Amino acid sequence: MTDDSTGDATSNDSTGDPTSDDQATDSATTGSTSDDPTDESVDADVRERIESDPYCATLGIELRELGPGSATTALTLTDDLVNFHGTPHGGAIYSLADAAFAAASNSHGETAVALETNISYLSAVDVGTTVLATATETHLTRRTGEYEVVLTTEGDGERLATFRGRVYRP
């Protein structure tokens, strides 16, 4: 915007930062702009409900980060999570991705339930590895949302799988 009296560029916000409007738009499509994993823009009751998920507790899935439309969960793959081949079960990896998807899609404080999901496994992983699932909101309307979850190994960041999901917000 231009100040008509001087011709100088001005900002629409109180910070004087001409890029702040762009950041607000970006956060609506890419999740939180905060680097703080305890982003206060997610309601405390919503955070507590997500963190107290009994299924996640049973598997050992922990919530590492939560922001509006984004979440990161972590799981260390133990001997209890292997299949009959002795390798980590794909269902454990899927559950980790689904937990990040559920956290991100419910972070706005409105109930969101899965309509469809899919996962593509890209690489095998060993017992003892900690896997991170980072969910990002890619599209949000009043009634639906779409999310992508990237699963990587903690430390070297090797990509293990990609999960995509769509939710309905009743």
Image (tube, rainbow, N blue to C red):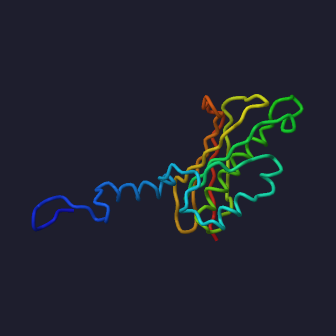
Q: Nearer the viewer, residue 62 or 93?
A: 62
Q: Is residue 15 left or right of residue 125?
A: left
Residue at the (51%, 54%) spot, across then down: 31
Q: Nearer the viewer, residue 7 or 35?
A: 35
Q: Is residue 86 left or right of residue 90?
A: right
Q: Quadrant of the C terminus?
A: bottom right
Residue at the (79%, 42%) spot, across then down: 91
Residue at the (52%, 60%) spot, across then down: 140
Q: Is residue 9 left or right of residue 78?
A: left
Residue at the (76%, 28%) spot, across then down: 126
Q: Position of residue 17 (x, y in %)?
A: 30, 56
Q: Quadrant of the N terminus?
A: bottom left
Residue found at the far right of this picture: 84
Write down the quadrant of residue 38 in the picture: bottom right
Above or below 49: residue 22? above
Q: Nearer the viewer, residue 61 or 168?
A: 61
Q: Is residue 93 left or right of residue 16?
A: right
Total of numbered circles in the picture? Answer: 0
Q: Position of residue 132 (x, y in %)?
A: 66, 40
